[in-house]
Image (cartoon, rainbow, N blue to C red):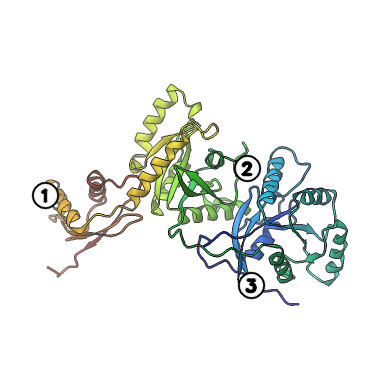
Amino acid sequence: MTTDPQPTDLDGTDEPTGPTPVLAVVGRPNVGKSTLVNRIIGRREAVVQDVPGVTRDRISYDATWNGRGFTVVDTGGWDPDARGLAERIAAQAEVAVSVADAVLFVVDATVGITDADEAVVRILRKAKKPVILAANKVDDQRAEAEAYGLWNLGLGEPYPVSALHGRGSGDMLDAILAALPETPPESFAEVGGPRRVAIVGKPNVGKSSLLNKLAKEDRAVVDDAAGTTVDPVDELVELGGRTWRFIDTAGIRKRVKEASGHEYYASLRTAGAVERAEVCVMVVDGSQPISEQDLRIITQVAEAGRALVIAFNKWDLVDEERRYYLDREIERELVRVQWAPRVNITARTGWHVDRLVPALDAALEGWSTRVGTGALNSFLGRLVAEHPHPVRGGKQPKVLFGTQVSTEPPTFVLFTSGMLEAGYLRYIERRLREEFGFTGSPIHLEQRPRKKGKK
């Protein structure tokens, strides 16, 4: 038995170079949609676990097959009779179908046609979009015979596939390309692309509510249950007259190694979203004390070298007494990130979310600030003269020369006569910020002590 070749991602880059046709992947919960999406895009990207309802939002991925690019939209399990959270997941799937050029309807061939499948078919017929029927979990010849019973859905030929093993995926992909419109010509007008913003924070602080308010639509599923978002969700948002790419991430758990199953992969993807971003909006529940978990995430962003804006959400729940204690917590707990712009918002109502734009601009400007070598060494000379390094053991290391080796984040190398103490490095960083700004950006300082024997 042969396995069909796997398609690969477009070119290994984050951004597609032009608008591409959209394929929505829909079906009942736990029929293997996310596994099939991973098969189509050729990498493990969509969170997969043998539990219904792991995918809750509509998640977009770039894919290519036979030289043609297209966008795959993975959706939560679609049950037309759903209530509560499941009902909102179903609504997301309907939105995905409405914006798609074609639909891949996934059915579990081992179960056969269910009432829910027939209800989905009725909705798909109303949408008047081309539909490709994938009969999933066809792992052998015997199951293939069962798959042809799906002709009775009235959607045309079912394509027997095994998302797990790749069986039949080539024929299915050929059918998908036949249903999708041709890819428009590539456009290279936008060189840099939209600035990338990751929305991070512990579970249930309002990250998805913030994304929905910024996008002016219910783009991410919002529920009071902590941990509703599992996959990172990318959304192009118009803010301040410009387009931004927002990445809503799963709530970062206490520690990756403590998370299990799909939470483990979601935590890894959240770390990946931070790496992929240029600036992170750290959402903190202003009505609750700043937690160790909040501080750990802030440290993660700073260590990754990303620009940072801290958004204190749920400000409508913050009374005078809470404000007093929050001010003390900020002074005590956030002393290492005093450089990060802070905004107070209420994502649920949209109060002050517009203040994010100037904060993001300031943070990105600080992140890309470059100091000339002449100006830097003039500053270092004054600093050392005013406040020399303390004498330790009869020795007093000196800063001989400095240079900024990179931006994003600003990184400096200091050539010294000996190892500088951590406290003195913090003093240099503080004075650098006073002199040159670097609002919203971590600064990385490296030192190169002169080797013994060299003058």
Find numbered disc 3 in the image and state the secondary structure of the residue it sits on: loop
Q: Residue at x 23, y 46 (%)?
A: 427
Q: Residue at x 20, y 54 (%)?
A: 376
Of circles 2 and 3, the one toward us is 3
- Mark 2 is surrounded, within 10 Å at the Cα level, by few (under 14), some (14 to 19) or many (20 or more) other residues, namely many
* Label 1 crowd (10 A; few <14 / some 14-19 / many >=20): few
Circles 1 and 3: CB distance less than 8 Å? Answer: no
Where is residue 118? Give x, y as percent.
Answer: 84, 50
| Cα separation between marks 2 and 3 | 34 Å
The x and y percentages for residue 91 are 69, 43
Residue, disc 2? 221
**Quarter where residue 41 is shown:** bottom right
For this view, does 161 lie left or right of residue 69? right
The residue that mark 3 highlights is 66
Is residue 392 visible in the rendered image? The answer is no
Give, as a three-letter code, the residue at label 2.
Val
Type of amino acid under label 3 = Asn
Expressed as whole percent of the image width and height from the top left, the position of residue 439 reads 32, 45
**Can you give x and y, in whole percent of width and height, for residue 85 in the image?**
69, 40
Tell me: residue 43, above or below residue 309. Answer: below
The reply to whether discs 2 and 3 touch (Cβ–Cβ < 8 Å) is no
What SS does tag 1 mark?
helix
- Closer to the N terminus: mark 2 or mark 3? 3
Task: State whether residue 361 appears in this view.
Answer: yes
Q: Is residue 208 left or right of residue 427?
A: right
Foreground label between 2 and 1 = 2
Give the CA separation, mark 1 to mark 3.
Answer: 66 Å
Dot 1 corresponds to which residue? 385
Residue for point 70% across, 51% down: 97
Q: Is residue 415 left or right of residue 299?
A: left
List the single residue furthest toward the bottom. Answer: 1
